[in-house]
Image (tube, rainbow, N blue to C red):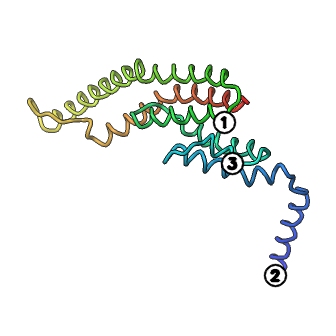
Amino acid sequence: MTDEIKSAREIAREKIDRLGEVTEEERLRWKYAPEGEMLASKYLGKGCDLAAELKRYEEKAKAYLKEGAESVLLAGIGLPQNEQSKSRNKKAMDGLKIIKKDKAAMEEVFININNIFDHYAGQGEQQREQTRESLKAEFNAKLQQAMEQQLGSVAGLEINVENLPQFQEEWRRISANMDIQYISLMEGYKKEIRNIK
């Protein structure tokens, strides 16, 4: 057993030796990127002055702080499903404006993202509602047919199919598929944001 442990240690040591020395850049990233993530989380949560917090750090740390903050802020942007998510989106986008130098490029991408949000809240909401009503009608018809086969006449019997687990599961699946198109467009714009200095 000791030979196996020693052998595993030797293998680990060889892998570490092959990696070489840790660079100064890697050390800075390991130290400051997580701090940037924490700053962005604090900014999105309780709220803090992100620009003032970043100014407290030395210049060589700022790029890594911003890198960490960027990942959290980008994750904070999602489909505007309610007022809370709309507010979070705005705050995350404002935070990204703080950490990016090219404000004009950022504004251009945000216009595109806001267009997605507007479509999602307008036409997208109408499509979701129409699809939900169609699904509801389909479930009602199937349920009525099944009940008539088992019970005979069921005139006047009303069942809210939206409460059925099968309906809810099917609606979640359909709704998620409808959201995918918006999410994939947003992911494309998030990639653009990552490339903006």
Q: Residues within 10 Å of mark 2 (few under 14, many from 20)?
A: few
Number of numbered tags placed on the structure image: 3
Is 29 rendered above or below residue 15?
above
131, 58: nearer the viewer: 58
Quadrant in which residue 111 is drawn: top right
Q: Kindly identify which residue carries mark 1.
A: 99
Q: Is residue 153 at all visible to an observer of this figure?
A: no
Give coordinates of residue 185: x percent, y percent: 58, 25
Could you classify mark 3 by the number of other residues whose Cα lies within 10 Å: few (under 14), some (14-19), or many (20 or more)?
few
Amino acid type at circle 2 is Thr
Relative depth, front residue between 177 and 107: 107
Question: Considering depth in this image, is 178 or 58 the residue closer to the camera?
Answer: 58
The answer to which image quadrant residue 142 occupies is top left
Could you tell me how far apart the alpha carbons at marks 2 and 3 are, in whole angstroms? 50 Å
Residue sitting at 54 percent across and 45 percent down?
48
Sequence-wise first label, 3 or 1: 3
Identify residue type, mark 1.
Ile
Residue positioned 87% across, 70% down in the render: 10
Check whether the beta carbons of the residues at disc 2 and disc 1 lie within 8 A of each other.
no
Q: Which mark is residue 174?
A: none
Q: Disc 3 designates what residue?
A: 56
- Which secondary structure, mark 2? helix
Task: Please name the amino acid that badge 3 sits on.
Answer: Arg
Q: Which mark is residue 2?
A: 2
Nearer to us of marks 2 and 1 is 1
Q: Within 10 angstroms of label 1, few (less than 14), some, or many (20 or more) residues?
A: many
